[in-house]
Structures are given as C-alpha cells and as structure tokens.
C-alpha cells in the first residue's frame, strides 16, 4: 500500500489537482513509501519526490527518474525528506544506487533549482544529499544531522547555517517553496520571472525601500544575523539583496554572503550589495582571512549584474571587498550623506592629519571634517570610484535604472573547471 501521508504531503506541495505521479503502478518487495511525480507549484513546472522511510535500491531508482526528468526538461527538483538513512538489508549495490542520486544532485547543481524540505527525520547520508540542494527548508520539529544519535535541534542547525529556512509546519514549508520557485528561473538558461508591480512608497528599511514589496524570501535568516540575504523583486524582476547593516565583516557573514552570491550567479540573478561596513573584524585572523578571501573570489567570479549601494558608511577593507568596481561591482551608487573611505576614519585622520592632532586639534572635529570632505561620496565620485550620488528619496529609481542598464550584460570567463579559492 502507498503511504497516504507521503502522498498527501505531495498534494499539499503542488497546486490543487496538478500532481501527476510517476510509476504509479510500480511494485517492489518493499513498502511503496517513496513517491515521485511532476506538476506545477505556483504555476511553475517542477519534478518532485518524497523520501519516506529507509532507502533501498528500488526507491533510489524511482528518485533517479525524478532527476532524469528534471534534467531533460530543465525544471526545478523538490525533495521531501523523512528518511532515516539506507536500508541495512541491502549491501554494496545500494551504495552504488545511492551514489547515482548524489551524482545527479551534484551534476544539476546550478543548472536547475533544487529545494529540500526536511519534514521528520533526515539522517546520515540522506542528510548529506538533502544539504546539496540550493535551498534547504526544515520543519522546526524535524531531525537533520549526519551522525545519529544527536541532540542538535533544527533551530541550532539553522543558527549554524546548514538550514536556510525554518518553517513551523509542512504547510508553511510548502508555501515557502511556492515563493522560491516563483522567484527563481526554471533553469540556468531561462530568463528571470517577470511580475506586475506598482511604484509605491518605500517600505521599511533599505530592503523595503528598493524592492517592490511583493514576494521576499530571506535565506539563512538565523545564521550570521548581522547580514541579510534576501530574494525579492525590483521593478518586477527577481533580484538578490545582500545587506551588511553597518557591521564589521566577520567570517560567518562572509560565508553567508558568498553562498548567496553563488546562488544568484548560477541563475543570473542580479546582486545588489548594501555595502555598509566599517571593515574586517579583527578576531580570529586566520578564519577571517579564509572567509573574506572566499567572499572576494565569489564577487569577482560572478558574471551576473552586480550593484553596490552605500547608504551610510563603507570604509577600510570592506570598502575594497564590497564596493570596488570591476571585480566586485559593475555600478557603484551612494546616498549623498554616506561616508566612503579606503581607510577607517580613525586611521585616516591619524595618518593624514597627525600634525594637527599633535598641535592639539580635537580628534572628533578632525574626524567630522574628514567625513565631510575627503570621505564624502562626491569626492569618491570625482575620482571615479562611485558612479552616482543621490538622496534617499531617489534610491529605488537609481537602483532600478542601474538594473535596467545591466539587464543585457554579457560577460564570459576563461574556460576552466572552477576556481580553487
């Protein structure tokens, strides 16, 4: 008998009446608790499967067909995981069959969107496969780890960055999947979705000010909270926004931003970086160096449209990493009251005006003078570092115009397998 709960979850995930089961009459010696099929979610064609119970060879073969279909037609793959690993009744042949699934998940990474929903137990090697998806959504009361037994909770896993979105229940997870597949293109060769929008008043915060306030999904919200990574729409097209919120760059936020850039670049989604940061955090120098190197490489390697936006302050190493034109940004914009400096304000004043400090002038007064003169966005624009300076009221129009200019961007790279760092 088929697992009615598994079938119900798939029907909940798909638009009403749109789920079509693959191999509906397939028989095996094991319980038929792995169900695969295709249909539409939020009007988007997808291939999906639910991995329910321990995997055996027959179930691996069924799931493999879901990947093969996605590869042929170029559509997203949605996997629902409620699986406690591999069946102990089968030997090395099962390991080979499971390896085929892992190979498919890896081969289609960045080719078609892949989303995992953890709804129950997802343990051992099943957890590894689920975590290979572009986005991992976990129902709060689930278990998700590689070495059972474990007391780690989904909340803790999300805080450590392995889970991208936490849902209170399966219905909320399914709703989030609908939002994500609406925002992402069908595959890496498809154009971005287009939405109807209104030029309404700016929403709350900088993300609300530049977006259409239609659909927004925050990725890795619980991890590295000093930076936001959000999929949303600007002028009716999907865009990714990375907002650093004025904090110093730490290893966790660098890893978080790097991961998001790779997701956006895979599907040619424009990246808008709100490059407000006072520099690189000095704690744990080796880890900071590794993380910031990966972030810098991700920006430099990405060929999607890239816009840097300074709304308060961008100084020191963060200025070079997040704001720099060429490798990190195609267009750099700034609000007219922002502060822009290749050195921290304190270091710049000490270096440039040491004699004035020695003569007794107030450090606070000198720092204020530096901000309004040498560290002003107008000064940066004069040197070609910034392309446009505008008031807060013009922020959305400026970003929208830059996105329009970059909509036909074409950039090729030297043929290679991948970068090393």
Image (cartoon, rainbow, N blue to C red):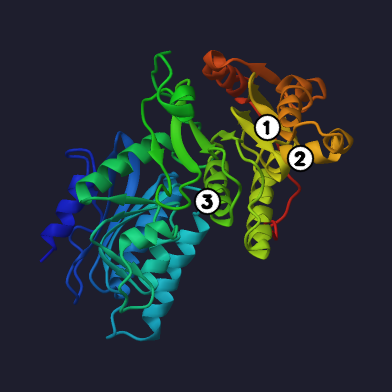
Q: Identify the residue shown where x is 86% and y is 38%.
A: 358
Q: Is residue 81 left or right of residue 171?
A: right
Instruction: Count residues near mark 1 (Cα–Cα under 10 Å), then give few for <14, some for 14-19, many for 20+.
Output: few
Task: Report which residue position mark 2 lands on.
Answer: 343
Task: Report which residue position mark 3 lands on.
Answer: 256
Q: Is residue 33 above or below residue 191?
A: below
Q: Which percent across, then down, holds residue 231?
A: 45, 37
Q: Secondary structure at mark 2?
A: loop
Circle count: 3
Answer yes or no: do the residues labelled 3 and 1 have beta carbons within 8 Å? no
Residue 363 - label: none
Q: Secondary structure at mark 3?
A: helix
Q: Is residue 90 above or below residue 184?
A: below
- Earlier in the chain: of badge 3 and badge 1, it is 3
Q: Identify the residue shown where x is 48% and y is 42%.
A: 229
Residue 410 - label: 1
Q: Quadrant of residue 272?
A: top right
Q: Which percent across, then down, holds residue 184?
A: 44, 38
As drawn, the residue found furthest toward the right would be 355
Q: Quadrant of the C terminus?
A: bottom right
| Distance of label 2 from label 1 (alpha carbons) | 33 Å
Q: Is residue 101 left or right of residue 387?
A: left
Q: Is residue 223 left or right of residue 365?
A: left
Instruction: Count residues near mark 2 (Cα–Cα under 10 Å), then give few for <14, some for 14-19, many for 20+.
Output: many
Q: Is residue 86 left or right of residue 364?
A: left
Q: Which percent across, then down, holds residue 418?
A: 67, 56
| Distance of label 3 from label 2 (alpha carbons) | 24 Å
Q: Which percent across, then down, holds residue 169?
A: 21, 51
Q: Identify the residue shown where x is 38% and y is 57%.
A: 158
- Earlier in the chain: of badge 2 and badge 1, it is 2
């Amino acid at each position: 008998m088929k697992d009615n709960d598994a079938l119900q979850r798939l029907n909940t995930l798909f638009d009403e009446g749109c789920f079509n089961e693959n191999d509906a009459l397939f028989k095996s010696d094991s319980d038929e608790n792995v169900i695969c099929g295709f249909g539409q979610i939020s009007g988007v064609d997808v291939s999906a499967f639910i991995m329910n119970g321990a995997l055996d060879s027959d179930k691996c073969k069924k799931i493999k067909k879901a990947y093969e279909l996605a590869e042929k037609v170029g559509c997203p793959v949605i996997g629902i995981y409620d699986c406690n690993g591999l069946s102990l009744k089968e030997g090395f042949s099962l390991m080979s069959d499971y390896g085929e699934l892992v190979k498919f998940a890896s081969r289609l990474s960045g080719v078609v969107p892949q989303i995992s929903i953890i709804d129950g137990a997802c343990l051992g090697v099943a957890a590894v496969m689920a975590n290979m998806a572009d986005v991992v959504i976990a129902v709060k009361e689930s278990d998700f780890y590689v070495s059972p037994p474990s007391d780690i909770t989904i909340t803790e896993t999300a805080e450590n960055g392995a889970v991208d979105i936490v849902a209170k229940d399966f219905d909320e997870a399914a709703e989030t999947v609908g939002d994500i597949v609406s925002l992402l293109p069908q595959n890496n060769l498809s154009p971005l979705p287009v939405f109807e929008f209104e030029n309404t008043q700016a929403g709350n915060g900088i993300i609300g000010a530049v977006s259409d306030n239609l659909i927004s999904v925050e990725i890795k919200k619980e991890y590295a909270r000093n930076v936001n990574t959000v999929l949303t729409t600007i002028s009716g097209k999907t865009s990714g926004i990375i907002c650093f919120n004025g904090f110093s760059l730490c290893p966790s936020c660098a890893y978080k931003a790097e991961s998001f850039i790779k997701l956006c670049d895979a599907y040619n989604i424009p990246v808008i970086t709100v490059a407000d940061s006072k520099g690189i955090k000095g704690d744990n120098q080796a880890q900071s160096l590794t993380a910031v190197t990966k972030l810098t490489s991700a920006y430099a390697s990405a060929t999607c449209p890239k816009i840097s936006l300074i709304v308060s302050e961008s100084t020191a190493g963060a200025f070079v990493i997040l704001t720099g034109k060429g490798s990190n940004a195609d267009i750099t914009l700034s609000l007219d009251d922002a502060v822009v400096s290749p050195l921290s304000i304190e270091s710049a004043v000490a270096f440039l005006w040491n004699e004035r400090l020695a003569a007794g002038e107030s450090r606070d007064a000198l720092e204020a003078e530096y901000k309004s003169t040498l560290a002003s966005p107008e000064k940066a624009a004069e040197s070609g570092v910034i392309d446009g300076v505008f008031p807060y009221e013009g922020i959305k129009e400026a970003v929208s115009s830059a996105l329009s200019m970059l909509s036909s961007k074409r950039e090729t790279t030297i043929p290679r397998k991948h970068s090393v760092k």
